[in-house]
Structures are given as C-alpha cells and as structure tokens.
Image (spheres, grey):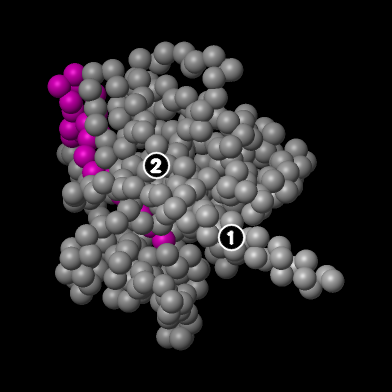
Amino acid sequence: MRSIVLVAAVLFLAVPTVARSQAPESWTIPRTPDGRPDLQGLWTTQTFTPLQRPPQFAGQEFLTEDEAASLADVLTAPGVDPLRGRAFADALGDDAGARDGATVQTDPTHYDNSVWLRTLDPKGLTSRRTSLIVDPPDGRLPARTEDAAVLAAMRREARGFDSYENRPAQERCLAWSHEGPPMMPPPYNDLYQIFQTPGYVVLFPEMANNPARIISTDNRAHVSDRIRQWPGHSVGRWDGDTLVVDTTNFTMKTGFQGSGDGLHVVERFTRVADDQIRYEFTVDDATTWTRPWTVEMPMMQSEGPLYEYTCHEGNYGMRNTMRGARLADRQAADGQR
C-alpha cells in the first residue's frame, strides 16, 4: 500500500488535465542502446474510464470537452473514493447530492479510501473515451456463446464455502485479475515497471502475487500446448516501433472476463510521448465470445518509488471464513427442524 504520509501530503494538490501531453511533431522516440524503443520506467493505467460503455453514453465514443472537464474536476476533487465504480457514469450533472453519491465512500466501517488510496497524481481520466473497449464500436463486450453460459454456470456451482479449495483465487491472494495478460487498471497500487535488455522485456506490476512477466522479443514459438499456466505463455516481437506480445496456453482457472482455456491475447505497446505508452490488447476466445474484442488505454508515466506488495490476508483469515460458514450451516439446519 502506498505510503500514507505521501498520500496525505497531496490531498489538496491541483487537479490534473484529462490527458497529460501529446507528442509534438518533432518528438523523437527514445531508444535503448540496441536501437529499440525505450519503454522503461514506471507507468500507471489508473483511470475512471470503465471497460464497457455505460448505457447513458450509447452511441457516444468520446466525451465532449465540457463533459471531460466537468468529470475531471469532480473525480480528482478531495474526498473522492478511487474505488467508486459508479463515478464515471453518475458524476455528471448539476445535482451535488448525486455527484457525492457516485464519488464519495458511504461505508463508515471501512478505512477512508479517499485518504488511503489517493495517489500523488489523483485518479481521473486519461482520455475522453467513454469506454476502454474500442472494438466492437458500441464499446460493449461481444455476446457470449452457449458454451460460455455453460462454463459460467459450472464456475458458479463450484464456488462456495465448503472448503478453502473453492474460494476465489483473488480472495486467497493467489492471483489478481488485473495482472494479466491482458493488463487492466487495478483498484489501487497501480504502478507497472518496465525493464528492457537485448532480447527481453520485463513487466512488473506493483500489486502482484506472481513473478514478473519476462517476455522474449525474438518471435520464438510458444511452448507445448500441454503446458498450461495461469498467466499463459507470452512471446514477443517488434513490429516497427511497437512491441507485440502474443499469449496463449492459459488454464481454465484464468477465467479472464469469463474466458476458457482457448483464450488468446495479443498486446501492443507503443511509446507515443515522453510520458505516455499506448497500450492495446485484443482478446479472442471462440468458445466464450462471438467475436474478438479490443481495448485501448494510455499508460501514463508516474513517479516512484514502487513499493513491495504482499497479500496473505485471505489465507490468514481462511480459518475464520470456514468457521463462519459452518455456523451458517448450523443455523440453517436448526431453522429447518
């Protein structure tokens, strides 16, 4: 978790603009000693822009300048809860009560997210898009297949409080759904560090329970289809000045947005300014969706340091989780007698 001292010190800083900068026409891509585009540094994907386009923005790919400016003011104001998922869709308008309901934490039993999770550069908008999904054009996930509906039902049936074995992986701190591939904006601890050496790129999320992604860039073949891993198997290549990363060999446990083990992810990293990488990914799984879909979002340069992250609470708390479940079982049985 970010240092509370640093967080508290910036509560009243001026709000940022929607997007920090665009590359001037004379801008030159920085390069590593081996001539590749230099992607190294600390980057953040934090944004209130939702994955799917909210219904009230149907048919509207981009916010107007006035809408973007209004949202930027509201979302980066002191007191805003960075975890408020409704903020993007519900924070526009003149009703102060509605804006507060969309952006301010209402649960008094939890620590104050607006203090604990606020970053030096407050979470806001990094573009005027109304969704991270850019294809399909409606900004929504494609329709699910019949096989996906069957798989979703099986997964729901398998979850429960029978034992530690069927608790969610994220609750157990085994894997975070944003770690990728593909990478998604995390709820907090949002930094990604990129390293490069000749022939390799390393992606290291700040909030991660798994090893860094070490990606070869020599366009080598994937490992055997019989070898399955939670983050799949990634291989990279350079397409001009864009790093392309192809990932297959996922397991059924990965379940990105409901996917199966046929998940195929293609990511593209393009340095477009001193302080910005354009990150795009296309997801394809014919057993889950009726067509592939694509996301585009900026990775904005950020200041460090990147703090060490560990998560074990779900494992420490498992005994009490199971005790609570057994108590509920006894209460249910007593009520039936």
Tell me the tag on residue 45. none
Q: Residue under circle 2?
A: 209
Query: What amino acid type should be assigned to the residue bearing mark 2?
Result: Asn
For marks 1 and 2, the one nearer the N-term is 2
Q: Residue under circle 1?
A: 323
Q: Dot 1, crowdedness within 10 Å: few (<14), some or many (≥20)?
A: few
Q: Is residue 296 visible?
A: no
Q: Which residues are magenta?
A: 28-48
Residue drawn 73% across the image and 48% down it:
157
Does dot 1 land on a helix, a strand or a loop? helix
Q: Position of residue 219 (x, y in %)?
A: 40, 16
Q: Quadrant of residue 253?
A: top right
Q: Is residue 24 visible?
A: yes
Q: Nearer the viewer, residue 254 or 79?
A: 254
Q: Quadrant of residue 142?
A: top right
Is 47 magenta? The answer is yes
Is 226 magenta? The answer is no
Query: What amino acid type should be assigned to the residue bearing mark 1?
Result: Arg
Q: Position of residue 126 (x, y in %)?
A: 34, 56
| Magenta highlight: main SS | loop
Residue drawn 20% across the image and 21% down it:
35
